[in-house]
Amino acid sequence: MEILVCARRVPDTSENEIQLNSAGNDIERDELVYSINEADNYAVEEALQIVARVGGNVTVATVGGEDDEEILRREMAMGANHGVLITDEAFRGSDGRGIASILKAFVQKGHYDLILTGIQAEDGGAQVGGMLAALLDYPFASLVNSIEILDGKKLKVSREIEGGNKEINEIDLPCVLSIQTGINEPRYVGMKGIRQVASLPIPTFGTSELGIPPGAVGEAAAKVKRVDYFVPALGKGAEILQGSREENIDKVLELVIAKGGLK
Amino acid sequence: MEGIESAAQVTLSLAASLATGRVLFLLIHILGVLCFAYIVAKRMVPLLRAERDFRFDHPLIRLGRVLKFWLGQWKHPRYKLAGILHVFIFAGFIVLAIRAFSVLIVGVSENFVMPGLSGRAGPIYDIITDYSATIVFLCMVIAVIRRLVFKPARYAVPARYGKAHTADAIFLLSLIAILMVADSLFAAARAAAQSQPGPSVETLAAFSLPWILQKALLSTALSTLGKLYFGAYLVHELTFYFLLCYRPFGIQFHVETSLFNIYFAKLDREILKPVRWGVNDEHLDQVKSFGVKTFEDFTWKHMLDFYSCADCGRCSDNCPATAVGRPLSPRFITIKARDYSFKRYPILGSTNNGETNNGAALIGSIYSADEIWSCTTCGACEEECPLLIEYIDKIVDLRRGMVDDGNVPQSLQKPLKALESRGNPYGKMEKKKADWANAKEFQQTCPVKTLGKNNSADTLYFVDSITSYDDRMQSIGRATAKILNHVGENFGILGAAERDSGHEVRRFGEETLFMALRDHNVDAIRASGVQRIVTADPHAYNALKHDYKDVPPVEHISQVIAREVKAGKIKFNPIENGNSVYTYHDPCYLGRHNQIYDDPRDVLDAIPGLKRVEMTRSRDRSFCCGGGGLMLFYEPKEDQRMGVQRVQMAAEAGANVIVTACPFCMVNIEDAIKVAGLEGKMTAIDLAELVDQQIARDVPI
Amino acid sequence: MARIFAYIVHKGGVAADSALELAAAARKIDAVASPTAILTGWGADLDAACNTLGASYPEIWKIANEALAYPNAELVRKALLKVLPSDSIVLVAHEHFGIDLAPGLSIKMDSAFVSDVLDIAGVEGAGLKVVRQEFGGQVSAHVRCDISSGAVVTIRPGAFKAVEGAPVSGVVVDKSNDVGGLVSGRRYLETVVAEAGDVDITKYNVLVSIGRGIQEKDNVAIAQELADALGAAVSCSRPVVDAKWMDKSRQVGSSGKTVKPKVYLACGISGSFQHLAGIKGSPFLIAINKNPKAPIFQVADVGIVDDILEFLPELTNKVREMRSVAAK
């Protein structure tokens, strides 16, 4: 099975406070470290496990710049056969639809039975997979948490729906699936593995290779643009309720209902 | 009886009766020796296919260790009864070895006398051997009774590791007992026969086994004695060769291998085994596969370890992982590998069924991943093993193999990734590394320099990740800084330039990441121009001292304090709370791995009014708190936390304050106090914190 | 302004709670617009669900088709494309079905797409300005979306408060005939219900999380009762698991689960960073701890210094009291 995984490099923000830059149009990125988007890593692992079962190749592609090559190498160290960097100045500022269009052009340059994406990026909208499927007219399933190969033509996939329930679907190949975290246990990639793939070539694709007309993607074509970032007002330390126990209970209940709601 | 013959005649007739079996005995000799040689050769096969291991250096030091640990049985008396029994058996065997050979030769050459034992030495030696045989026999009886009646817990085999080894042990003990009886009977029959014509020419040691047997045989007919003499010899010979050839199939192989195992034992225990012997760091990239994945990836010495294990169970008896019900028992790390090796390299039939490739992955077949991750590398097992079997290197090698295959628990992947990208397992920003020292109020009382272009110092305080980032442990950092400040040390920290020491990274098998962390730190330390290093973290201490090269000498803060107390630079205010009873918990990497046992205790004892008690398990038998570094991120299956057992030990000792000298011990022990429900009854404090609290600052120094 | 549609998910003849939230969001985009609800499905359940919306939507479009008996996003998309004007603004709840449907719908409608919207900041000409969260909720962003050729917008459940407006007497318009035969490359087989008792703490909006302060196993029931009353789940910190008072699957933290609730009630939890590492998405954190110096108060939004063993049962009683009043 030929599998394409579309991956992204994102800042790892989990352990550190994110700060805004002085202009307020972006987060302060200087001190951040980047890595592959968590869900995308699960997608690559899933692809590798499928290939280990039924044979084939795994290609990992990312739309981005030179810096993004590092995640391709990481995934190649994991076992992906190929890494592809889709890069062009003209791609800068693309919205979800733009990225999906670029990926569509790339997909049409090859032959893939299965295309996987992570369900969502830290700064993304859970959109590219579904858009890519629609552009390609491939069937699509999101939030996939298990994949079973039925035969060369279809899969049995499970989607994570409310309450931890699973929705089981049969889906024809080729198709696009967006992978939920926790579908597997991704293998560890150490520095040694990355070093061993350091010299492997990573082909790049741009507008000319993909035959994308100028202006079709990128900032000019984007219908959706981020205007600014802002930090929602946050208090410093807890507001310690000083009331009587009864008053505190009323307040807690009020807050629980207001912020989370009763079921 | 046909008339009394002379003693000489009796001797002759006995010799003649033995001579009738000469051909048989010779045959048994040849067969026995051939069998043994064949078996040993077969057992050598895996060792020859194993990885390299450099153990041929320092022959004199190694011989010295043979004298101490093999001949001197150094570790044995750590377990009193079993240890003393073993010392006796061992001594008996050494004595009897010479007799055994001479007896064997007597079978084919009746008048043989061991060179050196003719003349006056002979009878003396005979008396010693008589007693030796008796003592060994008695030891066997006691050992069998222990096995059958008292059943020491450490010999038990948990169900998951298979059947009990009792039957095999008793079988072997009985064979030795039979050997002793046969040997004694041989001597007794001859002496009894000789004594019949008149006063015996041979005197047997009074009250020894041969002596008792002789007394019992005094009135036995000479012809019967002749048969007994012959029979005892035959039994002795058969038992001897059976044992010789049977031992390589089980725990008694250590009789043959222990000498070699101790000779080749690791000399520098604190230094971790390199990924591959003979491959230096620069060339490691060319090594395709790291660590131990299949049996043949073990080094030959590690295989010899497997052969040498006597199944005494002392390792597991002291293993904290075993104690809390983790899926790890060092004893079975060895036993399982040995059984696997015997199966894969059978004595009969072709070696591993004719395959030439390496066998199946060990993880998933004989070992489980959880088993291998369960080890805290505390070193209790190695400290205990009388045969100096190595465990930590094997565990680390197995982990290296798992890391190389990407088989790393999910909970460890995140901190490892953070160590790679941020230099600390928490993923905290580098610029926040010195935050603990930069709080305004603290900087005013105790300025801490961050070394760099504009700041230099004589001494580097290497803080390491947990003390830098963990709110609770930052207090240890501040206490350390205040102590250094008090004694007038010109010191500084690396701040953002300091990465995690990588101590646990290395022990978790991520050698490449460790090397990156180490190289970064070595560069930063050297660039800072300091003359020496101080740390309050024993893990960092161990890394800087043994894992790093080309860095200035390093000291743990407890050593600095002890020295300054002796020099009179640190004086203490007396302890005010008269109800406090202190006990010192030895951190594994300060105590067992670096033998710093006395400095912290000396410091405590220098504090006026401090009542200190020792826990039963202290010093080199200290019980691990639960492990440091990455161990905090790994959740093994266990019945109880190690720390909980440890604080209970402190409570049993009558202490209500546990003093330790390691931030990881502090995490585990403070947590454990709460889990054990001892909150309010027990507290924990770091040595540096206690010293900082008790220092008499108004006393001029 | 283009017409606003709200695609309503329903089950067992009842529209999802998000139906009212979508109506609220629609009104925030255009205060005077009358958003149209669209429901797809088959049989009596569909009719029943349409009828429940009469009070909140003036117009309810119904698409009945046997192929839509179970919602298949691709088929729903095909059906919607047949009936929606091309410049429509379509609102969909950002849950598992919306995630399946919305991105592809926007492609096929050739319209803008913005997902997981928390708030509407306003409309300026053809630009719809919305608020989203990024990086695990640590920062928010204003996003401008060109709606000149329509838009598909997914709305975070719970982000918009259902407004109690004057009831409208909505009419159900049957659009079923506009939709022909539907085929998809994906076929629904079955739903596997999560094992009973197997509580997935990552799925709850409200977590009652307990730490060492719960003191003993029997006291876990105190937290469970509160959780039951609130419709929440009980989670815990590591010591509780270590003590075997709760199953490992309930543990929040770096070595346990990562949860993203909306409200996190930290009861008797000191707040180690290993524990806090498991709390994502900036929930509203209420800490109850008898130790006023517990680090949890540094990160909590609201703190109460009290003994949870006394506080929680009283809180439970209050919730039950309130529920029984509401039921009357």
Image: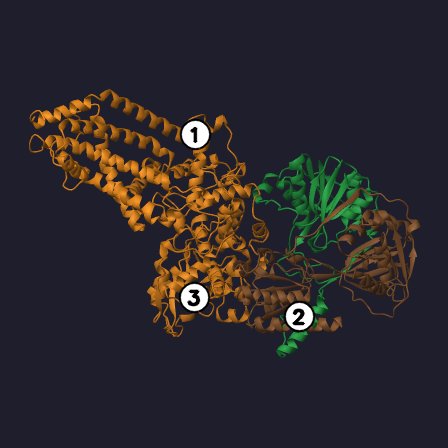
Label 3: few (<14), some or many (≥20) within 10 Å?
many
Q: Which chain is painted in orange?
A: B
For residue B483, the mark is 3
Residue type at tag 1? Pro
Q: Nearer the viewer, mark 2 or mark 1?
A: 1
In the rendered structure, the residue with mark 2 lies on which chain?
A
Secondary structure beneath dot 3 equals helix
Q: Is residue B116 left or right of residue A164?
A: left
Query: In the rendering, at what x and y percent does residue C1 appear?
Result: 91, 61
**Chain C palette colour:** brown
Q: Residue furthest bottom?
A: A244
Alpha carbon distance from label 2 to label 3: 37 Å
For image coordinates 39% across by 41% down, the residue present is: B165
Q: Which residue is mark 1?
A: B346
Residue type at tag 2? Gly
For residue A235, the mark is 2
